[in-house]
Image (spheres, rainbow, N blue to C red):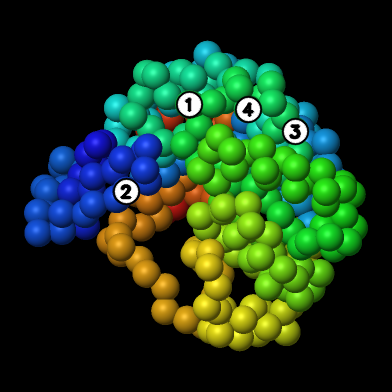
Amino acid sequence: MKIRLGPDGVHLFDRQTGLNVLLDEVQPAERSWSAAPRQVSIAVTNACNLACSYCYAPKHRAALEKSQLLRWIDELDEAGALGIGFGGGEPTLYRHLPEVCAHAASNTDLAVTMTTHGLRWNADLISRLRGTVNFVRVSVDGVGSTYERLRGRSFTQLRAALEAIAGTFRWGMNTVINEDTVGDLDAIVAVAAEHGASELLLLPEQRTASTAGASKGTLRVLQNWVSAYTGPVRLAASAEAELGVPTADALPRETGLRSYAHIDASGTARTSSYAPSGIRVGDSVIAAFEQLARMEAA
Ligand code: SF4
């Protein structure tokens, strides 16, 4: 198991099973806390072959340089990060993805996760990623005609992809909650359960420069649905989600950049993928996060 020291204690993590153990009787000295964020999301490319209206990914062409990305991954591992999550854009359009995942699997103890629309996971890609990705997050916004209207792709095609992914990887479903999808929540859970998802991550649509975000009425419907939920798939929510129910926070003192950071496809470190500004990462990703922390504190 990987060991991470932080303000909440000694954190043990097994990337194969996702098991977390926190020894909170132990209080490591601050100088020994792991320097890296616990989890880092990395947008490897801005490219995507879909055009969802609520997409907030940058639209200019950008992709990370492979050798630099591999160095950052090694540094994050050595500095105590527990996981990296590849996204985009659509990460499967990044041509170095299999090599990068293989490097992380064999040279580090990091858990590798991936957020994907799932539609490119054919037998060839699955065989190239097998054994190197610990958890796949598939974005499924609505079912049937809702999905097809929002994503412009066949729901039958998605179902086939879910079947293929579930046959090889542990996986969870990500759902953006907005006026279009909130009425599909029961059906979304049914599809997730049918394909063996271990988690449904609820992501209320965020307001961006081009989208209004989920309305108050939609958020109220979501809160009521969550309060009454007794379904078979575990629910999780984004940090920004206000679900109106108590949520567990096992690491309450590991906040901000100690907990999470994002690197965009242009190589800029940010506090989140929505953050308006950031710090360009050079040779050292940890140095960039430290500079970002000072900028945030100023
Ligand atoms: S699949 Fe994701 S990255 Fe692609 S357009 Fe839709 S929201 Fe954006």
> In which quadrant is the N terminus drawn?
top left
Query: What number is the disc on residue 126?
Result: 4
Tag 3: Cα neighbours inside 10 Å, few (<14), some, or many (≥20)?
some
Q: Name the amino acid type tagged 3.
A: Arg
Q: Name the amino acid type tagged 4.
A: Ile
Tag 1: Cα neighbours inside 10 Å, few (<14), some, or many (≥20)?
some
Q: Is the residue at mark 1 in contact range of ligand 1, meaning its CB lies under 8 Å from it?
A: no
Q: Name the amino acid type tagged 2.
A: Leu
Q: From where the camera sits, is residue 279 visible?
A: no
With 270 as the anchor, is 187 left or right in this view? Answer: right
Residue shown at the point (71%, 36%) measured from the top left: 90
> Between marks 1 and 3, how big is the CA–CA gap?
18 Å
> Between marks 2 and 4, how big is the CA–CA gap?
24 Å
> Between marks 1 and 4, how big is the CA–CA gap?
10 Å
Disc 3 versus disc 4: nearer the observer: 4
Query: What number is the disc on residue 19?
Result: 2
Q: Is residue 122 above or below residue 197?
A: above
Marked residue nearer the N-terminal end (2 or 1):
2
> Between marks 2 and 1, how big is the CA–CA gap?
18 Å
Marked residue nearer the N-terminal end (2 or 3):
2
Label 4, secondary structure: give it. Answer: helix
> Between marks 2 and 3, how big is the CA–CA gap?
29 Å
Marked residue nearer the N-terminal end (1 or 4):
4
Residue shown at the point (48%, 26%) measured from the top left: 131
Q: Quick one: 146 or 169, which is closer to the camera?
A: 169
Marked residue nearer the N-terminal end (1 or 3):
3
Residue at image mark 3 = 120
Q: Position of residue 49 (x, y in %)?
A: 83, 36
Marked residue nearer the N-terminal end (3 or 4):
3
Residue at image mark 1 = 131
Query: What number is the disc on residue 118?
Result: none
With 292 as the anchor, is 97 left or right in this view? Answer: right
